[in-house]
Amino acid sequence: MNKFPVFLILSLLIISYSCKKKSESPGARPLLMSINVAGKYFNQNIGGVIFISDIPGRVLADTFCLADGKYKFFGTAGTSAPTSLQVTTVRSEPYLHSFKILIQTYTYISPSEWTLQGYRADTVGRINPVYKNIPAHNDAFLVSSSGYSNLTLHLGSIPIPLYKTPDDIYIGIPTSAGMKYKWFSGVHAFATDTFDLSNPLPAIKKNIVFPAPVEYFECRVQGFPDENFNSPIPYMVDEILSNGTSANSVDAYYPPLKFQGFHTDIMALESYSLNQSWFYQVDGQIPDAFRKIAAGLSSFTPSGASLRLHVSGDLDAATGTWQFQNPYQGDVEWTVFGPDSVNFLQLPQVAQSLNNMFPWFNRDSLSFINVGMLDLVNCHGYNQMLQLLYDPSNPSNFERQETSSLRVYYSRK
């Protein structure tokens, strides 16, 4: 009877063990998602989190992100990637004495590649304004540079941040003779500039009609000098807050011959007695009318971290949003997105990276606040919406899509 030499047996065991270890290496684990982070999508001083979950909500992979780059998310060795995943992003910004934290979860995602495209600009300095010959006015002034605006009843010496230098400064002046403006060119950072507001010029008026009378509205119009709607530094050319009286339309004002296109963002509340708000935003020319989403909500029942709902009509996605507010910890808003046909949404489990970032965070402390219905006008369906937003070669974002939406708020009894 032949016997293997001891050294040969040991060699076979070593080879066998080596192959087993190799099969458990990262290269043998299933690739769940590949996500490119660009344009300072996350605050570069605070960072953010991305985590991948299965549909029941179990966390499969997560990471903390401080810088732009490409992040790959792998599952457990010896498993296969699920055919359907959830992708969650966590962004935060300083807010008062704590943080404003925005969490978004997208459900029913196939393993794929995404790009999270940010549009964040850095200031290059500021100017110290001195105003003279301030006209009589009957509402708030609007002071705007590229990427900055301030709506104020009293012009003072508050510094104006600049995101480029030199820059131009727009001042909207509400007078008894209508909205007027002054435009100041070639303003340099780190200077004290005097703005003479005598002899303001008339602004152009654009009337935007509501489909039904509204009891409250907010309207903001940003201007783009070169139609680059992805620019992070547009001018705020008008910001109108309703005085609470019923209105059939809103008048927006802007300076002539300064802009090639605009971004218009409107919120409308038809009745204070209803628990719903309508939203419409569009790039290009300022619209003639508010476009109302053709969707409705039959019923919804929140229960802790889950939501049952029935929506119908022309929409691309349904959402559920939960909230937590604490002035010394954070202001959290967590929204879960699902297809237009979805009837159940729930918050996934919390990833360790999120708990490491905010140790006080507890999913159970969140309270449900609203159901949303979302329609991207130039899109057909949930999958195409995701393609528009996160296409790795040409990503967009919600702010640069023509979007009509409705939020129905939850009243606790």
Image (spheres, rainbow, N blue to C red):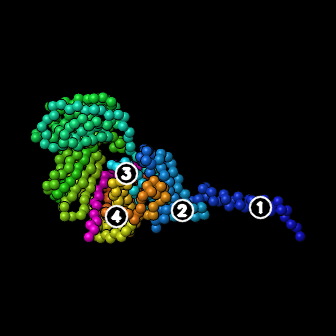
Q: Nearer the viewer, mark 1 or mark 3?
A: 3
Graded by Cα atoms within 10 Å as few (under 14), some (14 to 19) or many (20 or more), the crowding at tag 2 reads some
Per the image, the residue denoted by label 2 is 81
Q: Is residue 408 magenta?
A: yes
Label 1 – label 3 distance at C-alpha: 57 Å
Per the image, the residue denoted by label 1 is 12
Which image quadrant for residue 279?
bottom left
Which image quadrant for residue 148?
top left
Q: Nearer the viewer, mark 3 or mark 2?
A: 3
- Of callouts 2 and 4, which one flags the residue occurring earlier in the amino acid sequence? 2
Lateral position of residue 296 relative to residue 212, left or right: right
Q: Nearer the viewer, mark 1 or mark 4?
A: 4
Label 1 – label 4 distance at C-alpha: 58 Å
Graded by Cα atoms within 10 Å as few (under 14), some (14 to 19) or many (20 or more), the crowding at tag 4 reads some
Q: Is residue 30 above or below residue 224?
A: below
Label 4 – label 3 distance at C-alpha: 18 Å
Range of the magenta residues?
Answer: 394-413
